[in-house]
Image (cartoon, grey):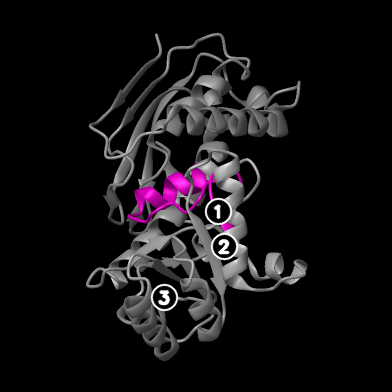
Amino acid sequence: MTTSTRHPSHFSLDPATRADAEHLIELALLEDLSDVGDLTSLSMLPADRSVSVQIRARQPGVLVGSEIITMVLQQFAGHTGDQSSDWMTDVKHSDGCSLATGTVVAELQGPVRLLLTAERTILNLLIHLCGIASLTAQYVQRVSHTRAVILDTRKTLPGYRRLQKYAVLCGGGTNHRMGLHDGMLIKDNHLAARENRSVSDAVRTARKFLREQSLEIPVEVEVDTLDQLSDALRETPDIVLLDNMGPDQLRRAVELRNSVSPDTLLEASGGITLETVRAIAEAGVDRISIGGLTHSAPALDLGFDWPW
């Protein structure tokens, strides 16, 4: 009988994120097995042989995907050709936990065919999501002495957005809008495409639309000069995104905001790295959004330890 043990969680998948994970696992299964199966395992290994394996961290990081391990095995178990469904997972740590080199993430027991067939899909998902959380945690640590929070962006892989943003949360970051449907961000191209390029007029237009649609969502506008910021603050937007500004310019932006529209949040973005994020946070901004959290995070090294 299939059993799964999970220890008390810091974070857990909500229903929508879980559904996305199930869909991605189904795609991974079809990519690997098609309607044939794992030819190598089927040809080499008996259906009734069981083994115990461990998933172990090979470098420090943050865990994401503790629930996904069991989800992968559940889907793959019906497609491996094994007669036995007697497998077990014992996940030792929960999402958001820090991992040291050598930490055992989970112990698995079951048919060797199943575990070999599911190994790569489990690792592909975990190393990617753990990598995002681990990079996020580094950014969060660099700015922990300031008021700034670290945010993600929409620079995500199709189908992975909820999972990638969940990984950012596990790393201590904060989610920006989920999509174009739940937040308004007036970008430079929106302004350029209008006949009227006034930033304040764009904010007024956005707020009028939201009132007409009976929508209560924040209005954010992007600026890249202090003159644009001054214009934007006349309409007290919820958030102003300060694009590609250095620390000195950001400090001046904070002073301007404080004197004109103190309730408006300031968000720095554009080309921010681990080397520059501390100085940007110390300039006094409220938010720092970083596309690299999801589009450039290196994979965290995890592996299966087999008994041979």
Q: Write down the residue under mark 3.
A: 274
Q: Which of the marked residues, 3 or 1, is nearer the chain's N terminus? A: 1
Which label was assigned to residue 207?
A: 1
Whether residue 37 appears in magenta in the rendering, the answer is no
- Residue in the image at 50% along x and 69% along y: 241
Picture quarter with the N terminus:
top left
Toward which corner of the image does residue 263 lie, by quadrant?
A: bottom left
Of the residues tagged 3 and 1, which is closer to the observer?
1
Task: Give the camera-side residue of 141 and 1.
Answer: 141
Q: Which of the marked residues, 2 or 3, is nearer the chain's N terminus? A: 2
Q: CA distance from mark 3 to mark 1?
A: 35 Å
Residue extent of the magenta highlight: 163-185
136 in relation to 243, above or below: above
* Amino acid of disc 3: Leu
Q: Is residue 241 left or right of residue 28?
A: left
Q: Position of residue 209 (x, y in %)?
A: 61, 48
Element at badge 1? helix
74 in relation to 91, above or below: above
Residues tagged 2 and 3 counted as in contact (Cβ below 8 A): no
Q: Position of residue 22 (x, y in %)?
A: 56, 27
Of the residues tagged 2 and 3, which is closer to the observer?
2
Element at badge 2? helix
Q: Position of residue 147 (x, y in %)?
A: 27, 68
Q: Is residue 172 left or right of residue 135?
A: left
Task: Give the camera-side residue of 259 and 254.
Answer: 259
Toward which corner of the image does residue 142 lie, by quadrant?
A: bottom left
Picture quarter with the C terminus:
top left
Q: Is residue 136 left or right of residue 199?
A: left
Q: Position of residue 53 (x, y in %)?
A: 39, 33
Count of residue discs: 3
Residues tagged 2 and 1 counted as in contact (Cβ below 8 A): yes
Q: Write down the residue under mark 2.
A: 203
